[in-house]
Image (tube, grey):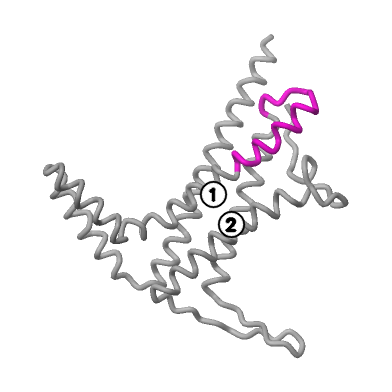
Amino acid sequence: MAVGTYKTMFHRWEILRGWIPGIVFTAIAIAIEILYWNYMTARGLADTTYNISIGVAQLPLSISLFLALGNAIVLLALWMSVFENTAFIMAGPDRKVRRILYPLRMIRAAAMVLAPFTIVLFVPYIIESSWYIGWISGLSTAIPSLQQSAVNFYNWAFDVSQTDPSYRFVGSQLSAALASTVVAGLQIWRVKGTRNMMLLLRRRK
């Protein structure tokens, strides 16, 4: 059960379609990061910009946006790693079957990497939104036993919301990247464990 790399399985330098999955995934990751960056700058994130000289041109470089886009590269690396370790599992020798399975497993790997990242990145701000607070208030009114828990939770959330936006921005980025790394690592560990078990059973036969 050989394990290939993204380049050997899909990425052909001379074929444009080999670039497409990576380009699409990177575009999605960048879109998520830009959406979050715009949201945070609207909430008071101080955006420090430096001008970099390239010949006669001046290129503005946003430190916070640079950090956000750096996470997009981390997500791309995680996605490629998960796909490379799961592409051949139970795929069989038939090339037609593999051509069907590879795109599906690429999508699955993308979901496993992007879902925890997006959830951890945005959930802290969703629970502070007025509509969510209204929903929790209605729920705690309907279930009186939840009222004290809701009050304690939102007292904590209010304290967190008063933190400097720069610290929150960096903390959210690092937490989201860590969540995706853990999920990807667990998936790779599970797949490798399954592969080793199958190899052991074959040897015993």
Q: Is residue 27 above or below residue 163?
A: above
Q: Position of residue 123 (x, y in %)?
A: 38, 54
Quarter that holds the N terminus: top right
Mark seen at residue 136 = none
Marks counted in the figure total 2
Residue lying at the far bottom of the rendered structure:
56
Q: Is residue 127 above or below residue 196?
A: below
For the residue carrying disc 2, how many other residues have a C-alpha within 10 Å: few (<14), some (14-19), or many (20+)?
many
C-alpha span from label 2 to label 1:
8 Å
Quarter that holds the C terminus: top right
Circle 2 residue: 29
User: Residue drawn at (66%, 46%), measured in percent from left and top?
Assistant: 80
Residue 156 inside the magenta-drawn segment: no
Residue 98 inside the magenta-drawn segment: yes
Q: Name the quadrant containing residue 122.
A: bottom left
Circle 1 residue: 114
* Element assignment for label 2: helix
Q: Name the quadrant containing residue 81.
A: top right
Q: Which is nearer the eye, 80 or 23? A: 23
Asked if labels 1 and 2 touch by Cβ distance under 8 angstroms, the answer is: yes
Q: Position of residue 198 (x, y in %)?
A: 64, 20
For the residue carrying disc 1, how many other residues have a C-alpha within 10 Å: few (<14), some (14-19), or many (20+)?
many
Residue interval drawn in magenta: 89-109
* Element assignment for label 1: helix
